[in-house]
Amino acid sequence: MDTIRSVTRIRLRSVDEPLDHPAAAWEAVRFLSAAELLGLLPASLESIETLDVPTVRAVLKEAAAAGVGRQALAEAESRDERDGGAWVEVLVHANDALADSPIPERTWPVLADLLGIDLLAKLVGIAPASARRYLAGDRATPDPVAARLHWVALIAGDLAGSYNEFGIRRWFLRPRSQLDGKAPADVLAREWSPDDPGPGAVRALATRLLDSAAT
């Protein structure tokens, strides 16, 4: 049986200016949640309890070092860091960059810890043995598999605002009326593309949870 460990390092207790601007706070939380599930939190950030500019900058730099969101980092470096409105724009661009940039070599370890290799393999439509090879770096992750892995990470990032690690795993396995009685794990079965209707419906369901948590 696979050992499943906690991956969540984001346990916010306070928000500092200017990220206390509601829209900035929302985009910042989305950014940090997605970055964590994609494997882009710096090792130096053992626990994130305060939502502040230094934390966001550190994650922007880590993402840029991995080739993601370099424009957003440049924007962050050139803006008045006391301007909450400017941070909204920076973080929207950063979130767009994360959504469009699969990084399988970083994402495999995080999702394997969160979901377990057997469930993760099922969600991305491959055999557990193949997933272990990609996780170990013995083989390069094919582009279609990387796209599915990325989609699962984005879904898990959306869920992180409403569920703990156990709840996220359970969410994928429970039937949903919005999915015609199927569980998300059953919709995300075999080979699929993020552009397919079923995976799109699964992501939309998770995003609605994220939106409701903001209101």
Image: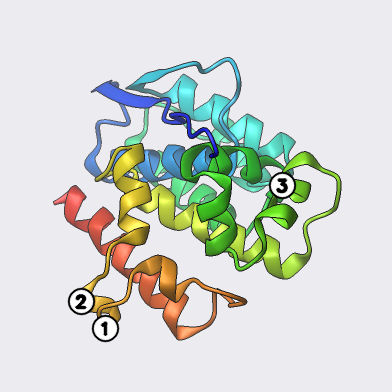
- What amino acid is found at the position of numbered circle 3 in the picture? Arg
Residue found at the very far left of the displayed protein? 215
Indicate whether 70 appears above or below 197.
Answer: above
Q: Which mark is residue 180?
A: 1
Mark 3 Cα shell of 10 Å, populated few (<14), some (14-19), many (≥20): some
Give 84 or 143, whichever is nearer the viewer. 143
Residue 132 badge: 3
Q: Secondary structure at mark 3?
A: helix
Image coords of residue 42 (percent x, y):
60, 24
* Residue beneath the point at 28% across and 62% down: 174
Q: Is residue 135 left or right of residue 35?
A: right
Q: CA distance from mark 2 to mark 3?
A: 33 Å
Which sits in the foreground, 100 or 134?
A: 134
For the residues bearing labels 1 and 2, Cβ distance under 8 angstroms: yes
Q: How is the image coloured?
A: rainbow
- Percent x, y for residue 30? 39, 45
Q: Mark 1, mark 3: which one is toward the viewer?
A: 3
Separation of residues labelled 1 and 3 (CA atoms): 32 Å
Under circle 1, the secondary element is loop
Depth check, mark 2 against mark 3: the one in front is 3
Q: Which residue is mark 2?
A: 177
Report which quarter residue 101 is drawn in.
bottom right
* Placement of 10 over or under 167, stated as above or below: above
Q: Is residue 213 above or below residue 204?
A: above
Question: Would residue 195 be found to the left or right of residue 139 on screen?
Answer: left
